[in-house]
Image (tube, rainbow, N blue to C red):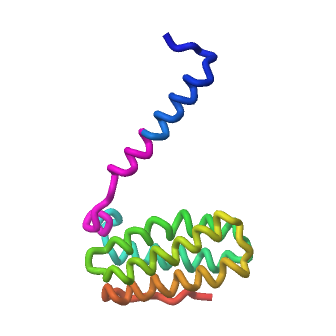
Amino acid sequence: MWALHDPAAHARIAAAAILAFALAGCRATVTPTQAVTASGSLVVVAAAAEDGLCRAAAALPDVGSARRDFENVAHAALHELAAAPDLARSLAARVLETMQVVERDIAASASPAVLAPDLDALRSSTEAAIRALGLPASPCLP
């Protein structure tokens, strides 16, 4: 029988739970075809990525709002865009690399002066990927 007040038992249970979640995440990979169809259309994915990035940039200097717009609107769409089967690997890598920079900025609560140019770089790499897929890219409206 498990002891209710055994810290080692609690640690083992926590470690097992973390391991189970990590392994479940590894098995739940998304193929490029699934990623493109997850939102119904690559056009929808591209529009969501652009919209989220434009919203995040427009929210500055409020870094909290920019973070929410990036995470709630753009983040998943950027992953789906990068997973598009017809996108060149170099362009997909550039989207993911610039997205990681923005994610690091957000995690570090970077200042708007740091976050703004990194969002611009992500916007540029996203636009290049969208155009390479033959889709229309939309500029951010002021």
Above or below, 55 against 29 in this view is: below
Q: Position of residue 70 (x, y in %)?
A: 57, 69
Horizontal side of residue 45 vs 105, given as left or right: left
Q: Is residue 96 magenta?
A: no
Residue occupying image coordinates x 49% and y 10%? 1
Residue in view at x 39 percent, y 72 percent:
45
- Give left or right: position of 11 versus 136: right
- Whether residue 89 is situated above or below residue 77 in the rendered picture: below
The quadrant in which residue 58 appears is bottom right
In this rendering, is residue 1 above or below 56?
above
For the C terminus, the quadrant is: bottom right
Residue 119: image location, x then y, percent = 59, 80
- Residue 93, quarter of the rendered image: bottom left
Q: Nearer the viewer, residue 139 or 115?
A: 115
Residue depicted at x 63% and y 67%? 67
Q: Residue at x 71, y 71 (%)?
A: 110
| Labels in figure, total | 0
30 part of magenta stretch: yes
Image side of residue 114 versus residue 135, left or right: right
Whole-percent x and y of residue 5?
63, 16
Which quadrant of the view contains residue 63? Answer: bottom right
Q: Residue furthest top?
A: 1
Q: Foreground: 98 or 72? A: 98
> Which is nearer the eye, 25 or 68?
25
- State the image coordinates of residue 56 (x, y, percent, origin top left): 61, 74
Q: Which residues are magenta?
A: 20-36
Magenta stretch: dominant secondary structure: helix
